Amino acid sequence: MISALLWGAGLGVGLWALAVWLFPPRPPLRALVDRLHATPPPPPILTADSDGWALRVGKPFVKPLASLGLPNRRLRGDLAVTGKSVQHHLAEKATLALTGLLLPVLVELVLVLAGLGLSWEVPAVAGLLLAVGGFLLPDLTVRQEAERRRANFRHALSAYLNLIRVLLAGGAGVDGALSDAVGIGRGWAFQQLRRALITAHITRTTPWATLGQLGTELDVHQLSELAASISLAGTEGARVRASLAAKATALRTRELTDAEGEAQSATERMSLPVVMLFGGFLVFIGFPALAQVLGGL
């Protein structure tokens, strides 16, 4: 029964992959026409890395996986935040899936050579499970890394807002305050802000436009709100210091709330090992007495 199911699943996946390779899905005509008449988007501010051994090993599988619509739009945004290209991500997924699929087979060959071979169903099932896990593991890693970078960026943005507010109070202009404040900070977040301002200078666009684009690429709406506030100060002469102070306070409040939530979550996670340790201690104390009682019956 299990053998028939595994052979049928493998045959079905193979036929489906062959059909996708022979007849790749084609976009509708309306999408192609809209693509011809659409204005080209601005160049992205976030850069992506496309190097590594995983890309070289899994490069033949990049196009078939991309033709299936992988990765989705949300994961593409997470990849942009982490600085990993789509090709690198797909190649890593394929490499880990192949590694998980072949690892049980290699272990089985070693056991066969040692005279301890198992039935073929065990490495087949283990290989499929490890292949699925290896295929999904890069997605989970990218999502966690993207959330960590967004949290660090919000923390740096709060300091950036305070620096801009101090420079504006000292009589600096909007453009000068943005450039001088970003030159003080260090780290990945200030590096991206500095790249956005350099892009604005090179392309001769307003700095708040590139900051808004960076906020969209990072999916950090606080930066988009900052760009909107600064645009009012740059185009209409609005007083922006009070708005920046309110935004910085809101960011600090959110960071404190997130820190308290993470601390409470860590405390709840620690309660389970304590309960298990207490239960083991009770079993360690009560088992000899229980054994003596049962032995005397």
Image (cartoon, helix red, strand yellow):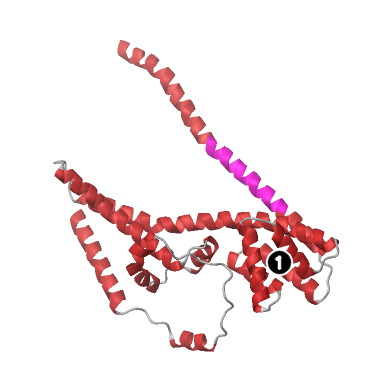
Instruction: Give coordinates of residue 270: x percent, y percent.
Output: 54, 36
Please tell me which residue is depicted at 42% across the width and 18% down the height of the picture: 286
- Regarding residue 125, the answer to whether it shows in the image is yes
Residue 172 horizontal side relative to residue 40, left or right: right
What segment carries the magenta color?
A: 252-270
Q: Nearer the viewer, residue 29 or 165?
A: 165
- Mark 1: which amino acid? Glu
Image quarter of residue 65: bottom left
Q: Is residue 195 magenta?
A: no
Query: Looking at the figure, which quarter contains the C terminus?
Result: top left
Image quarter of residue 64: bottom left
Q: Nearer the viewer, residue 244 or 18?
A: 244
Main secondary structure type of the part rendered in magenta: helix
Q: Nearer the viewer, residue 79 or 185?
A: 185
Instruction: Give coordinates of residue 115: x percent, y percent.
Output: 13, 41
Instruction: Give coordinates of residue 47: x percent, y percent.
Output: 54, 67
Residue 24 horizontal side relative to residue 161, left or right: left
Q: Is residue 269 magenta?
A: yes
